[in-house]
Amino acid sequence: MSQTLKAIQPLKAVRGTRDLLPPETELWNHIDATARRVFARYNFGEIRTPIFEDTQLFARGVGEETDIVSKEMYTWEDKARAQSEKAQSLTLRPENTAGVVRACIEHKLGEQGLLQKLYYIGPQFRRERPQKGRYRQFFQIGAEVIGPPSAGSESPLRDAEVLEMLATLLDELGITGWRLLINSVGTPQDRPRYIATLRSALQPVVGQMCADCQRRAETNPLRVLDCKHPEDQPIIATLPRIWDSLDEESRAHFEQVCEALDACGVPYEHDHRLVRGLDYYTRTTFEFQHGGLGAQNALLGGGRYDGLSEAIGGPRAPGIGFAIGEDRLVLTLQAQAETARADRADAYIAPMGEARNAMALGLARELRAAGLRVELGDGSFRLKKSFEIADKLARKIAILGEDEAASRILTVKDFATGEQMKVPWAELKAHLLPH
RNA sequence: GCGGCUAUAGUUCAGCGGCAGAACGCCUGACUGUGGCUCAGGAUGUCGUGGGUUCGAUCCCCACUAGCCGCCCCA
């Protein structure tokens, strides 16, 4: 038998997915915990919806024509297992709002007449070209406020409260330099009217614009507003604004959102160009931006979706929500943290000689039971090696050699001060506590 | 999905059609139970994968894969 010379090709995480490893996972947990804490103060409860749903939910909810639905979904035909069962088209959720609204309808959550305030944390899936801050499996932290109009779900106060909560969350996470952009896209009737107005306004001037804009003017005129070419800016400034296509009610609604934000001191900018969004957005749309994320400068986005519930077969249940790109939050925080100083264990126990191993485990068990974070070495290590490892992992080293085992008085050295002392076994717990 | 750039040691990156390199990290010793600083020594590796050109390819060419940047779109 001849050996196969070619090594087996190791499998890798699939494109656009990745492993999150320590110590980065600690940051993720910190973000999750902070979000949960803040949401709890605003009386939100957690919802966990399935990671895959009937494809129809997204087709009807998010919109058949959106890029997400038309080309970015992971969809498959679930096999029928029995004669009576028919194959069903399923899709990994590309976003979570539709799932939450579906759950609200399914469990008749709105029918107690109360506002539903729900948050979620979890993976979403879109088959896009991966980039920094853009992955095929990515994580969103989101929340929705939804309910019957009688519960006040349409009130601009809800919009403002959600935005104020987000400002609080970003501040508590220590994100500095964020910008809040808000706008109103009006009712489902306003937007097509505006697009028509925009098209005719572009007609005479589009010839002087960049090649991208000439293409956009045909395919998606709203995108012209986002053009970054400096030469195009004077022209863009002259284009009609969606504000002028809004009805009186939508304008009043928006003005009340701004008023409430002013009252609580949340800074924002009314960005007339923020007209993007999924099909279900109505009235308020918003985005928190942060530099340093390249083309993916949106840290989170959201808006009002007054017609979504009805679009997927539910009762009238206006709502507002947002989704935070957790991957982007992590990138931002990592860029901000100059020295992400890995925190150390409280103690490293260095048994001297394998005969001391058993006793060392007993000591570690005792200290860990007291809540201390303990790294346990090995008796086969030379003391020098123990020191080298301990200096990387722990604040202090506790040496358990023959003398120490006999006298039950350990040698403890503090790496920060270089101070070394003898500490009786019984006093170790107190001695090793971080101060 | 389209366009561009990139892929070499654990990491960050040099390099050249003919022996595979640096820094940091790692290992050993100076120092029998004392880390950090210093000094001496040592090991790094299918040069992303597959094919082609060539006497010879890590280098040139093609394809694929992955990452990054931009487009599209979005968190």
Image (cartoon, rainbow, N blue to C red):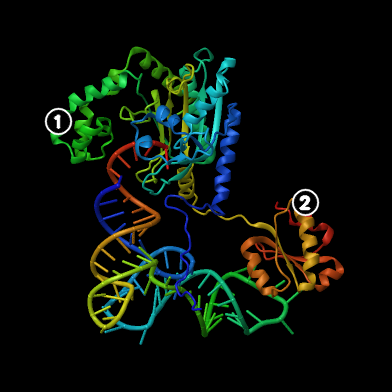
Which residue lies most toward the right here? A407
> In the image, what residue type sits under mark 1?
Val
Task: Say whether residue A79 is left or right of residue B54.
Answer: right
Along the viewing direction, whichever of A3 and A245 lies nearer the viewer: A3
> Which of the two residues, A73 or A54, is positioned nearer the viewer here?
A54
Query: In the structure shown, which secondary structural element does the residue marked by tag 2 occupy?
Result: loop
Q: Is residue A109 above or below residue B43?
A: above
Q: Label 1 lies in what chain?
A: A
Earlier along the polypeptide chain: callout 2 or callout 1?
A: 1
Q: Position of residue A5 (x, y in %)?
A: 46, 75
Residue A240 visible, this orientation = no
State the residue position of label 1: A205
Task: Determine the image quadrant of residue A420.
Answer: bottom right
Q: Within 10 angstroms of label 2, few (less than 14), some, or many (20 or more) residues?
A: few
Picture residue at 58% right of the left edge, 55% below the top: A342
x and y, in percent, of residue A22 in the image: 57, 54
Select label 2 or label 1 by which is in front.
Answer: 1
When asked about the image quadrant of residue A252, the answer is top left
Circle 2 chain:
A
Residue A326 locus on image (x, y percent): 49, 42
Foreground pick, A159 / A304:
A304
- Is residue A31 visible in this depiction of the protein? yes
Kindly check if marks 2 and 1 are in contact, taking CB atoms under 8 A apart as contact: no
Q: Nearer the viewer, residue A135 or A6?
A: A6
Q: Is residue A240 left or right of residue A181?
A: left
Residue under circle 2? A370
Q: Residue at x 49, y 78 (%)?
A: A2
Amino acid on which disc 2 is placed: Ala
Rounded to the nearest angstrom, the CA distance separating label 2 from label 1 is: 73 Å
Q: Check disc 1: other Cα within 10 Å, few if <14, some if 14-19, many if 20+.
A: few
